[in-house]
Image (cartoon, helix red, strand yellow):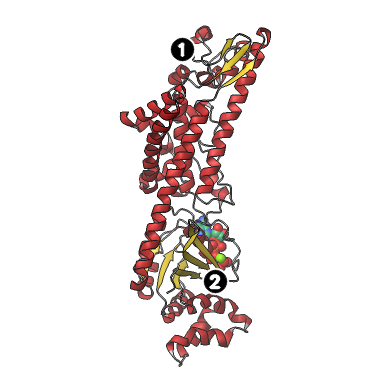
Amino acid sequence: MKTVPEFAIIGHPNEGKSSVLSTLAEDDSVRVSATPGETVVCQAFPVRIDGREIIRFIDTPGFQNPRQTLEWLQSYQGPEEGMLEAFIGAHQDDPAFQDDCELLRPVAAGAGVIFVVDGSRPLRHVDRAEMEILRLTGAPRMAVINCKDEEEGYLAKWQGEFRKHFNAVRLFNSCRANYRQRIDLLESLKSIDQQLEPVLRTVIEAFQDDWEVRSQRTAAILAAMLIDIISYRRVVPCAPDEEERKRQDLHRDYLEYVTGRERQAQQAIRALFKHNIFNLELPPQSILAEDLFSQRTWEFLGLSKRQIILAGALGGAALGVGIDAATVGTSFGLFSAVGGLIGAGATALKGKDLLSGVRLLGMKMGGEQLRVGPVTNIQLLYILLDRGLLFYSHVINWAHGRRDYERMAALPMTAGATGGFTRRWQREQRAVCDRFFRAVLKGHEGEIEETSVALQDLLRDQFLGLSEDRALLGVEGDPAEHS
Ligand SMILES: Nc1nc2c(ncn2[C@@H]2O[C@H](COP(=O)(O)OP(=O)(O)OP(=O)(O)O)[C@@H](O)[C@H]2O)c(=O)[nH]1
Ligand SMILES: [Mg+2]
């Protein structure tokens, strides 16, 4: 085995080899397609951490002529070490064995084998032939069952057969596997060959360290975003007669700013988790696809209607409170979508005259100037934190090999998915948020730095918990899990 461990992903056409590789290597550039025969030549996909290659997976075409290949290998009389080279030498110009030669090349060169089957279909004779070929190669090998459908009736049969031919067997769903399952698969690989163990242990450690680094960086990205959004201030010249219009402009600018700033943070997080090509599209039912300032967002994240009104965060219109259009257009509706934020810190609202108590905190006229910001309501911090945590859990649970977006998106959001994360936080955790919020409002650099570090530590721990915790992983409702 070489210094960089190398594994060829081998199997029947269209079983999900490329898809498994894509997820395992966190590489969304791997070509996956519903048409059998998509992969025709071997291609190595290195996994790099800090620019250093630590493991390499090789995508291969599916077996083309396994029965005859097996017959040839079984009747081979020469020295065992030269068997694969001899097979390739004898068949490389025969179009009927083109794929078989190609897929056996990396094995002949010493790569370990990960054999992929679709465990949702019954076992066939041809599968046994393929397994027997791999056994004869003598390569360290493990079998991976990738169930393309939910059907699990054949699993026991597959597992029984695999035990005869492989050193290890694992279920690994290329569309759903996450960080934990990738690590588990690597752990199993360790057991297929003693010689592989030390180098794979190093690989696993590198994966784990890298995951922590990514989680730490995600926390830093979110903290920087929060500082920008909370400390947002603008001052514009404003004559008394244009106050109303200017307020609306400022309000709109703020909405755009917050939305854009959040999107920017999400893109940075996405890149950190190597989703480079496909746009991890949020299912339409996802609360993350919902506008940051919509009532649904705020309710979903655990605020009651009354709390939302108290936060003054949403407009009367959004809440369905019967306010006549004229009033909505002026002091309440338009501003109050971010009211509490820039904001119309609405006090308790009662019926039709609820507008009388509305004060526009944070937005004030002074001299010939209109000032806005900073945000005065800590609720926005929690909403943004919740959305950050949801986005993280969405990203880490989006397997790189997953390509069937439509099907995933069409499924309903799960019942268990209501409520934010921060709502369940303890008093100490809320205190960290509180100190951070106040420091940012005060604008004291040192204090911001200090409280931001505490917030990042808190977030990193939450992220790492989310990476390991099966129960929480479904929080965004991985629809495949529940269909
Ligand atoms: N629903 C579902 N579809 C899957 C899964 N794994 C693979 N597929 C789909 O099955 C098809 C084949 O996947 P590939 O990864 O290209 O299969 P392959 O074994 O590399 O195929 P060839 O390169 O043609 O031999 C693609 O349409 C995948 O999206 C899975 O776990 N669930
Ligand atoms: Mg392929």
Residue at point 42%, 41% (across, down): 475
Between 184 and 325, the residue placed more toward the observer is 184
Between disc 1 and disc 2, the foreground one is 1
On the picture, is 104 further left or further right than 181? right
Q: How far across and down, in percent of the image, does residue 214 sit?
A: 45, 47
The type of residue carrying mark 1 is Thr
Q: Secondary structure at mark 2?
A: loop
Discs 1, 2 touching: Cβ within 8 Å: no
- Ligand 1, by image quadrant, is bottom right
**With respect to residue 82, does 473 lie above or below?**
above
The type of residue carrying mark 2 is Gly
Tag count in the figure? 2
- The quarter of the rendered structure image containing the N terminus is bottom left
* Mark 2: C-beta under 8 Å from nearest atom of ligand 1: yes
Residue at point 54%, 25% (across, down): 232
**With respect to residue 265, does 214 lie above or below?**
below
**With respect to residue 222, does 396 lie above or below?**
below
Per the image, the residue denoted by label 1 is: 347
On the picture, is 137 further left or further right than 45? left
Label 1 environment density (alpha carbons within 10 Å; few <14, some 14–19, many ≥20) = some
- Residue 325, by quadrant, is top right
Label 2 environment density (alpha carbons within 10 Å; few <14, some 14–19, many ≥20) = many
On the picture, is 374 further left or further right than 237? left
Between 469 and 325, the residue placed more toward the observer is 469
Per the image, the residue denoted by label 2 is: 62
Residue at point 59%, 12% (across, down): 331
Q: How far across and down, in percent of the image, does residue 19 sit?
A: 52, 60
Q: How far across and down, in percent of the image, does residue 233 sit?
A: 55, 22
Spatial CA distance of label 1 from label 2 is 67 Å
Furthest residue in direction bottom, as rendered: 77
